[in-house]
Amino acid sequence: MPREIVEDQVFEKKDFTIHPLPKGEYEFCSFLNCNFSDSDLKGISFSECEFNACNLTLAKTLGTAFKEVKFRDCKLVGIHFEICSPLLFEVNFENCILDFSSFFRLKLKKTRFLNCSLKEVDFVEADLMGSSFDGSDLTHAKFEKTNLENADFRYAFGFQINPAGNSIKKAKFSLVGLEGLLSTFGIEISP
């Protein structure tokens, strides 16, 4: 059965929990104020699409393709991005809530997390080389064996990163962020 290809469409205020998004390939599409909460996105491909003010909480993403996809003002709580299709996987987030989501072992080079809530997000063994976390809350986010080379944490907060357990060469941190780097060593920092 041939896959449906949908191009340059705008989907606005659609509730895909009632009427699921048809399986297929979506290219250059925009999703505005749509509800995908707990939806099954298995086997759907999104290429150069934008999601604005959408709710994707607990969406099922096994084999879902996100190629050059931008999320703005979206709620993506509990998403397992590590089970998405890894082929050409590229995402960027702005003003999004990604709490309790997982990027375990994903290649996320130069990914942008701008003003996002990333509480308890799993970045274990992910490749975040050159990524930016400007204005993002990383409280209890997990970093273990993570590639953070050239990543920018200067304006991020709430993180705790063990420099001995992660690759942080040329990563950028502010003086305020030093506590998040040194807390694993039991070092106290005074203002």
Image (cartoon, rainbow, N blue to C red):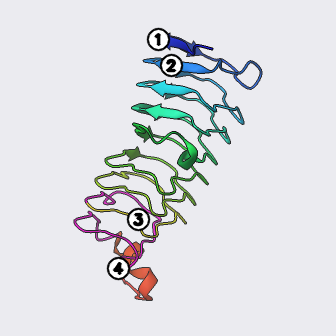
Q: Which residues are magenta?
A: 150-176
Q: Earlier in the sequence, mark 4 or mark 3?
A: 3
Q: Secondary structure at mark 2?
A: strand
Quadrant where the N terminus sits is top right
Q: Earlier in the sequence, mark 3 or mark 2?
A: 2
Quadrant where the C terminus sits is bottom left
- The residue under label 1 is 7
The image shows residue 62, relative to residue 175, as above or below, that is above
- Image position of 140 (left or right of 144): right
- The residue under label 4 is 191
Toward the front, the furthest residue is 1
Q: Earlier in the sequence, mark 1 or mark 3?
A: 1
- The residue under label 2 is 26
Mark 4 closeness class: few <14, some 14–19, many ≥20 residues within 10 Å:
few
Which amino acid lies under the numbered mark 2 shown in the image of this protein?
Tyr
User: Which dot, 2 or 4, sits closer to the camera?
Assistant: 2
Q: Position of residue 132 (x, y in %)?
A: 33, 51
Q: Earlier in the sequence, mark 1 or mark 2?
A: 1
What separation in Å lies between label 2 and label 4 (alpha carbons)? 51 Å
Q: Nearer the viewer, residue 104 or 139?
A: 104
Residue at 54 percent of width and 59 percent of height: 122
Q: Position of residue 142 (x, y in %)?
A: 51, 66
- Image position of 78 (left or right of 162): right
What separation in Å lies between label 1 and label 2 (alpha carbons)? 6 Å
